[in-house]
Image: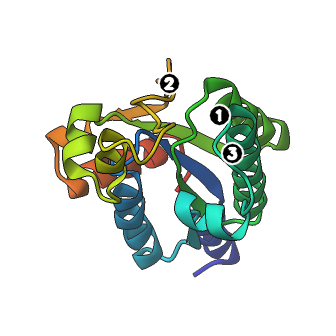
């Protein structure tokens, strides 16, 4: 193997990028992110998944769910994602991120730094999400035990022009992860 070939191979797996998956609670964001992360790791990529629930616990503890706090949470996640991606990590970010201006600020931060970024809308309808109800949030909201549920009684601004829209309720997790993998390949982020 020539040094040029070796460097090319290292660059191929060493290039970082942020893969931002936005959608309603129980849309399938984390499931898709984990499936893609496993494939990327198997191929030798450095991968990290910044799960919204874990971030809330460890990085954004103390923040509530007001518009301002949600914006702050998204900006913190975006900062960490961009930092990791700039150091060669494929950073998958499955978070609700309900507001378009918050997501756009993250995209602009990546663009300003020259760091790869794609936004993926996991477009599972609220009716399907409420049946899945992975965390019991929709049931709590329906019972009056919870208010401010994104997409029900709190806004979710659907991405107008995402890099990819996944109808996760109409295809398998594997097909969803494969579509996202194809986007990364097409954008030369692999």
Is residue 8 among the parts visible in the rendering? no
Q: Which residue is mark 3?
A: 74
User: Looking at the image, which is closer to me, 136 or 188?
Assistant: 136
61 over 25 or under it: above or below: below
Q: Is disc 3 surrounded by few (<14), some (14 to 19) or many (20+) residues within 10 Å?
A: many
Q: Are marks 2 and 1 in contact (CB under 8 Å)?
A: yes
91 above or below 162? below
Mark nearer the N terminus (3 vs 2): 3
Number of marks in the rendered image: 3
Residue under the image location 80 percent in, 39 percent down: 109
Distance, label 2 to label 1, CA atoms, is 9 Å
Q: Residue at x 45, y 45 (%)?
A: 146
Categorize mark 1 by other alpha carbons within 10 Å: few (<14), some (14-19), many (20+).
some
SS for tag 2?
loop
* Quarter in which the N terminus is drawn: bottom right
**Where is mark 2, residue-wise?**
159
Q: Quadrant of residue 12?
A: bottom right
Residue lying farthest front? 144
| Residue that carries the numbered disc 1 in the rendered image | 103
Neighbor class of circle 2 (other Cα within 10 Å; few <14, some 14-19, many 20+) is: many
In the image, 145: left or right of 98? left
Q: Position of residue 102 (x, y in %)?
A: 69, 32
* Callouts 3 and 1 close, C-beta under 8 Å: yes
């Amino acid at each position: 193997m020539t040094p040029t070939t070796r460097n090319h191979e290292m660059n191929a797996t060493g290039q970082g990028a942020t893969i931002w998956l936005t959608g309603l609670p129980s849309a399938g964001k984390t499931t898709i992110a984990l499936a893609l992360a496993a494939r990327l790791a198997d191929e030798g990529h450095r991968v990290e998944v910044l799960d919204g629930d874990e971030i809330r616990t460890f990085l954004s503890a103390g923040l509530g769910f007001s518009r301002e706090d949600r914006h702050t949470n998204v900006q913190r996640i975006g900062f960490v994602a961009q930092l990791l991606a700039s150091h060669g990590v494929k950073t998958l970010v499955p978070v609700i991120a309900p507001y378009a201006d918050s997501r756009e600020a993250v995209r602009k931060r990546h663009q300003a730094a020259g760091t790869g970024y794609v936004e993926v809308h996991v477009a599972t309808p609220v009716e399907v999400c409420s049946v899945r109800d992975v965390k019991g949030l929709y049931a709590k909201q329906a019972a009056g035990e919870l208010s401010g549920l994104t997409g029900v009684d709190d806004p979710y601004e659907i991405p107008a022009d995402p890099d990819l829209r996944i109808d996760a309720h109409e295809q398998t997790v594997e097909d969803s992860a494969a579509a996202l993998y194809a986007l990364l390949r097409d954008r030369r982020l692999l």
